[in-house]
């Protein structure tokens, strides 16, 4: 039987593109490249290794930042010239601190879809965007930000605020009034609490994934 690595079609520079995908959320985290040695180390050690084209060297994801990627599965595409690393990330994938390198939208929401007022927004996407915005506020701490004031209030006040918002959801559920709005308030404050406690939404997603599985 042909060794798995021999099935990979490396390009003229000895490289193959690699997409990293979060096993818990399905999110695309980054696009990088691997040479044969990087792929061999990934397969033997179970941690994502890549080849830096700019530095011309092999590198292990998270060697400096600590944001490693445990490789759950390596997949080869139908033409054998691209790889997919299905990973469990430990921290953000992007050097900017973002969870994914693909956080800049060039087009999408307004391309061939209904007007904004009629558009359905995927729940998971909206939660991730909100969590990313909250994380940005936490890093930059802009003056006058409500999110910043919540974070600065401390975990006790934040936990109390989440409890108050949960009560509002219960009241709304019993009265059939403003339930979506109150639920949105609860989710927002819960995300702020998670950010203050340094618990990423990907950790919550992994728990849900494991329970579902």
Image (tube, grey):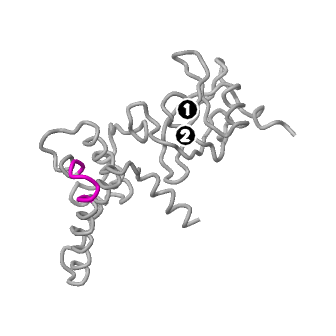
Q: Is residue 92 left or right of residue 194?
A: right
Quarter of the image with the N terminus is top right
Image coordinates of residue 156 in percent, x first then y, are: 27, 59
| Neighbourhood count class around disc 2 (C-alpha, 10 Å): few under 14, some 14–19, many 20 upward | many
Image coordinates of residue 181 in percent, x first then y, are: 21, 67
Asked if disc 1 and disc 2 are in contact, CB closer than 8 Å, the reply is yes
- The label nearer to you, 1 versus 2, is 1
Within the image, what quadrant is residue 4 found in? top right
Would you name the residue on which mark 2 appears? 20
Give the prevailing secondary structure in the magenta stretch: helix
Q: Is residue 149 left or right of residue 35?
A: left
The span picked out in magenta is 151-158
Residue at 54% across, 37% down: 68
152 in magenta: yes
Q: Which mark is residue 103?
A: none
**Closest to the observer: 110 or 176?**
176
14 in magenta: no
Determine whether 170 is above or below 210 in the image.
Answer: below
Q: Which mark is residue 61?
A: 1
């Amino acid at each position: 039987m042909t060794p798995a690595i021999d099935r990979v079609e490396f390009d003229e520079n000895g490289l193959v593109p690699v997409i990293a995908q979060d096993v818990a959320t399905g999110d695309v985290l980054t696009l990088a490249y691997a040479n044969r040695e990087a792929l061999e180390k990934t397969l033997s050690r179970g941690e994502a290794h890549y080849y830096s084209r700019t530095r011309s060297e092999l590198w292990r994801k998270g060697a400096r930042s600590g944001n490693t990627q445990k490789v759950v599965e390596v997949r080869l595409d139908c033409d054998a010239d691209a790889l997919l690393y299905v990973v469990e990330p430990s921290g953000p994938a992007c050097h900017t601190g973002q969870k994914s390198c693909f956080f800049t939208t060039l087009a999408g929401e307004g391309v061939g879809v209904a007007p904004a007022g009629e558009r359905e927004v995927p729940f998971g996407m909206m939660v991730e965007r909100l969590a990313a915005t909250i994380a940005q506020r936490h890093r930059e701490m802009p003056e006058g930000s409500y999110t910043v004031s919540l974070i600065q209030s401390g975990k006790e006040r934040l936990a109390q605020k989440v409890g108050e918002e949960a009560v509002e959801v219960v009241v709304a559920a019993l009265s059939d009034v403003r339930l979506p709005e109150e639920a949105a308030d609860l989710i927002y404050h819960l995300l702020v609490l998670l950010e203050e406690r340094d618990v990423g939404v990907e950790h919550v997603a992994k728990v849900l994934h494991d329970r579902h599985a």
